[in-house]
């Protein structure tokens, strides 16, 4: 899934109510007898960058807005942007996004505003002078509306970096420093689209429970979502732009929740969203004609990639890798894994209407494992049961959380009857573990137990006698009996095996799943990553593979 960023809208941070506002002499006073006049007066003050202004409520409208505080200020700024018409890009969207601080108070029938703004008139005018040169560079003259939107989206998504200091809020910041937060991305996208003749709006809401802003755009009579921030290329994406949030309907626009003003009947009537996401031409990367979302490949191997163009086209494809020293790609789409790491392979069609295909590739080195483990480790990896994250430091002791991950991958690959899923809810030390779900998956099914009633010890190591118990528990889970294939002589260190573990060690050894060094079992020794893979490969081959074949439907 795409990374989660800490998005920020300046307007939500510093709207402050100052009880002492009554001492200010407000330079401009306007009057309003209804909500339309009120929002027009509010817009006049904010768009004019007035430091202080007031609005007198007249007639029955004077009975409105008895609660004037910071929450009220946020609500009214957004309600203003929704209520006022925006037919040519000069609506209140920009004014809404240019507020740095807004203090509000009420004295009788007068509401007082004191504003501070992110950009001054000169800076805003300078931004406007940059729009035409950008569009000229994009050569949008004579292009379809779709191509105008695509070129603008791609420009904003590839020419700026997300500001991780969370201090550069505007499109002016982006154009002068190369970095900005979502507010700047949305503003620049909005202005470029309108300058190109494409209706657009700015929407405010949340993403990952953080304030966030994005755009909607009108195409062929319907409105679609755009999020240049989330799709933008930067160091987090290996400088690859994604297209996951391009021209999406609401159902496909994952992770976005509108603020109530932008989810209102008024706004949705003004900007009715498309029922389906736009069917944009796209390049999709394949392996042997099959679509994959990504690939893990061993170093030293080569693999041929292909493409499918939807709709079908004979357009030439250009291939590129974000780092040819890790995984290279030739002009025909053949990749070669060179050293461990992660890259994105991109397939770009000469026909610019097509969205490029982005194919993540992880290169792993498996030749550094111990010779005794290589055959079974590679075999287990090729079954896709051994994750790339564990493809290094093979002699390193495996943690309890990592072993839970291996168990979850294996068990979930085999069809099962309805298994009770009981969230244990008692482990206080797994929330920060990247394998927390695997831990819950295994413990709720009785495959793994904690180290106490309240702890799992995810970073703890696993001993060989503990592994013997887990293997036996795994067989019991699938109701598989381990045949006694091996007659075992007593180990010289049998007395070192814990009393509770004797039956499990005996069963695992007699079933051919574990063995000692000929004389010793070494029950307290830690299980390494490569040993864990070997043990589970033996369990799968001898007991679970026939079971899986029996329960899976025939192809």
Image (cartoon, grey):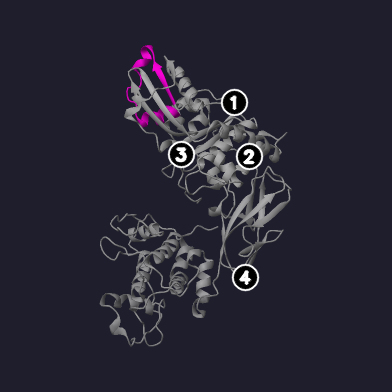
Going from N to C along the chain, the mark reached first, 2 or 1, is: 1
In space, the residues marked 2 and 3 are separated at their CA atoms by 22 Å
- Spatial CA span between label 3 and label 4: 47 Å
Indicate the secondary structure of the residue bearing disc 4. Answer: loop
75 falls in the magenta region? yes
Q: Secondary structure at mark 1?
A: loop
Q: Return the residue nearer the eye: 9 or 258.
A: 9
The spot of residue 202 in percent (x, y) is: 52, 33
Q: In the figure, 144 relative to 363: above or below?
A: above
Task: Check contact, mark 3 vs mark 1: CB within 8 A.
Answer: no
Q: Which mark is first along the chain, 4 or 2? A: 2
Q: CA distance from mark 4 to mark 1?
A: 57 Å
For residue 264, above or below residue 551: above
User: Label 4: which residue?
Assistant: 300
Can residue 387 be seen by looking at this rendering? Answer: no
Q: Which residues are magenta?
A: 52-77
Residue 82 place in picture, x, y as percent: 48, 26
- Asked which quadrant contains residue 399, the reply is bottom left
Q: Do tag 3 and tag 4 residues touch (Cβ < 8 Å)? A: no
| Local crowd size for mark 1, using a 10 Å CA cut-off: few (<14), some (14–19), many (≥20) | few
Q: Does dot 3 land on a helix, a strand or a loop?
A: loop
Where is 505 relative to 279, above or below?
A: below
Front disc: 2 or 4: 2
Residue 320: mark: none
Q: Quadrant of the C terminus?
A: bottom right
Which residue position holds label 2? Answer: 152
In the picture of the structure, the residue carrying the numbered disc 1 is: 88
Which is in the foreground here, disc 3 or disc 1? 3
Real-space Cα distance between discs 2 and 4? Answer: 40 Å
* Image marks 2 and 4: residues in contact by CB distance under 8 Å: no
> Tag 2's secondary structure?
helix
């Amino acid at each position: 899934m795409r990374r989660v960023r800490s998005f920020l809208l300046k307007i939500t941070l510093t709207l402050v109510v100052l009880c002492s506002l009554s001492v200010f002499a407000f330079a401009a006073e306007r009057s309003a007898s209804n909500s339309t006049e009120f929002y027009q007066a509010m817009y006049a003050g904010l768009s004019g960058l007035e430091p202080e202004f007031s609005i007198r409520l007249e007639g029955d409208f004077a009975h409105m807005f008895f609660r004037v505080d910071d929450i009220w200020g946020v609500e009214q700024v957004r309600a203003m942007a929704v209520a006022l018409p925006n037919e040519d890009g000069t609506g209140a969207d920009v004014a809404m996004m240019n507020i740095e601080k807004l203090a509000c108070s009420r004295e009788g029938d007068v509401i007082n505003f004191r504003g501070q703004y992110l950009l001054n008139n000169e800076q805003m005018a300078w931004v406007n002078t940059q729009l035409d040169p950008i569009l000229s560079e994009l050569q949008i003259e004579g292009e379809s509306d779709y191509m105008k939107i695509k070129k603008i989206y791609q420009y904003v998504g590839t020419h700026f970096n997300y500001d991780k200091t969370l201090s550069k809020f505007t499109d002016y910041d982006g154009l002068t420093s190369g970095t900005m937060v979502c507010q700047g991305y949305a503003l620049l996208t909005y202005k470029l689209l309108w300058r190109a003749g494409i209706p657009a709006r700015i929407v405010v809401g949340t993403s990952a429970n953080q304030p966030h802003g994005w755009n909607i755009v009108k195409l062929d009579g319907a409105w679609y979502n755009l999020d240049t921030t989330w799709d933008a290329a930067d160091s987090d994406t290996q400088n690859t732009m994604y297209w996951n949030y391009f021209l999406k309907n609401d159902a496909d626009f994952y992770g976005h929740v509108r603020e109530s003003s932008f989810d209102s009947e008024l706004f949705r009537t003004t900007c009715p969203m498309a029922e389906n996401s736009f069917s944009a031409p796209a390049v999709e990367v394949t392996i042997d004609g099959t679509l994959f979302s990504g690939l893990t490949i061993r170093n030293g191997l080569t693999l041929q990639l292909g493409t499918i163009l939807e709709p079908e086209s004979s357009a030439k494809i250009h291939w590129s890798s974000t780092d040819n020293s890790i995984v290279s790609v030739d002009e025909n789409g053949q990749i070669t894994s060179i050293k461990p790491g992660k890259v994105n392979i991109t397939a770009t069609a000469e026909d610019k209407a097509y969205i490029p295909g982005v194919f993540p590739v992880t290169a792993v080195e498996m030749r550094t494992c111990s010779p005794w483990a290589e055959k079974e480790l590679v075999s287990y990896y090729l079954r896709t049961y051994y994750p790339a994250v564990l493809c290094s430091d093979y002699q390193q002791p495996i943690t309890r959380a990592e072993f839970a991950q291996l168990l979850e991958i294996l068990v979930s690959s085999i069809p099962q009857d309805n298994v009770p899923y009981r969230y244990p809810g008692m482990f206080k030390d797994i929330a920060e573990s990247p394998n927390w779900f695997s831990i819950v998956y295994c413990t709720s099914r009785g495959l793994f137990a904690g180290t106490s009633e309240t702890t799992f010890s995810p970073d703890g190591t696993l001993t060989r006698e503990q592994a013997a118990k887990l293997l036996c528990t795994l067989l019991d889970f699938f109701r598989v009996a381990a045949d006694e294939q091996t007659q075992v002589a007593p180990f010289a260190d049998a007395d070192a095996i814990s009393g509770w573990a004797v039956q499990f060690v005996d069963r695992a050894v007699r079933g051919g799943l574990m063995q000692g060094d000929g004389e010793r079992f070494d029950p307290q020794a830690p299980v390494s990553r490569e040993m864990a893979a070997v043990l589970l490969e033996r369990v799968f081959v001898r007991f679970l593979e026939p079971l899986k074949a029996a329960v899976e439907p025939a192809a």
